[in-house]
Amino acid sequence: MIPIARPLIGDEEKQAVLEVLDSGMLAQGPRVRAFEEAFAQMCGVSHAIATSSGTAALYVALLAHGIGPGDEVITTPFSFIATANSILLTGARPVFVDIDPVTFNLDANALDAAVTDRTKAILPVHLFGLLADMEKVCDLAAAHHLAVIEDACQAHGADHKGQRAGSFGTGAFSLYPTKNMTSAEGGMITTDSDEIAAACRLLRHHGVVRSHDHKELGFNFRMTDVHAAIGLAQLHKLDQFNAIRIANADYLSRHLQGVAPPRVPAGYRHTFHQFTVRVPHGQRDAMAAHLKAHGVGCAIYYAIPIHRQPYYTDRLGYTDCMPHAERASTEVLSLPVHPSLSGEDLETIVATVNVFGVSR
């Protein structure tokens, strides 16, 4: 089976972990600080704050911006549920705006109509490794004095005209094993704001200013030095990993038939956390079964948009109609694109997809 994802852990990561274990400093320490500094440099920002997960990064970033009960945060319905759940956890309400059917990202042209006097932030998602239209997002946010919090959990190293994900507003990254780089588990917040960075550091560590001096109600969302050691080794490989993903995506896009491959707008560097195609309406599930039966892993991201999830409809009363997100959820299929793929693997993926179309 060609897997849909495969973490690449090499000798560098193993040696880095052994050095931390030998040091006796296992909790948040010098490796976390080094990882934060290197990650901030990669994103082109002043600060990076390591957390225990990408969800924690999103939640802490929202809290650091003062988001809370009674507030509204505009976001996309087509993402992993943690995007919207992080908003709910603050006591605020997610307000969904439909997606651009070409990029699958938040439709920036529809944002203005969603702004109310309760709106405090916009939370775009850089889905599958492609930045949202941050020029329009940031312009609208500035016009309405709103915070911008980027869900960059799938967009490590992605950029628009050279500006990296996580540098347009306050960024939140995931370092889960299936991402373009991993720390085994963890997250990262990025910002140019000294004030937001200080608030994030307080919140991730019990609100402590110094030993036993707790200024805020915080959490235990720290990253360990063990995880940071893995993350730092992976960060040094990120450009190489992304270059292979981009090359694999190019091969697939040029050779696949009968499906619509991802489209990358001019000026954008898509880093292909997922290579997500559209399958002709009504054929997606059959194609997924065909691929798996012939040894090609695939996955559906996302089969149910967030606003249609039972918790949102049954418990929260969401009745939104998001036709582009709803249609995409019936047609999208993600194919393997990770750096572990061989040339033979790529040929197999293409042949298996293409023969499905011939057999229909």
Image: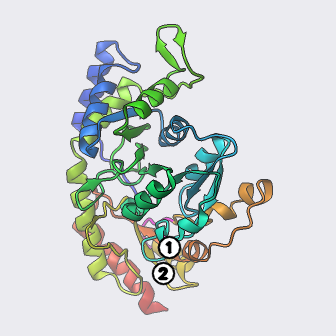
Q: Earlier in the sequence, mark 2 or mark 1?
A: 2
Q: Residue at x 46, y 50 (%)?
A: 148
Q: Quadrant of residue 326?
A: bottom right
Q: Which residue is mark 2?
A: 279
Q: Which contiguous range is marked in magenta?
A: 292-299
Q: Disc number at residue 275?
A: none
Q: Is residue 29 above or below residue 330?
A: above
Which of 203 and 35 lies nearest the eye of the viewer? Answer: 203
Q: Amino acid at mark 2?
A: Val
Find the distance from the CA under tag 2 to the CA under tag 1. Answer: 6 Å
Which of 61 and 227 lies nearest the eye of the viewer? Answer: 61
Q: Is residue 252 above or below residue 314?
A: below
Q: Looking at this rendering, what residue extends furthest in the top direction?
A: 212
Q: Quadrant of residue 328?
A: bottom right
Disc 2 element? loop
Q: Which residue is mark 1?
A: 332
Task: Locate residue 224, reporting x and y percent.
Answer: 41, 25
Q: Quadrant of residue 102?
A: bottom left
Task: Locate residue 67, reporting x and y percent.
Answer: 59, 41
The reply, left or right, for residue 240 in relation to residue 46 is: left
| SS majority, magenta | loop
Q: How many marks?
A: 2
The reply, left or right, for residue 197 in relation to residue 318 is: left
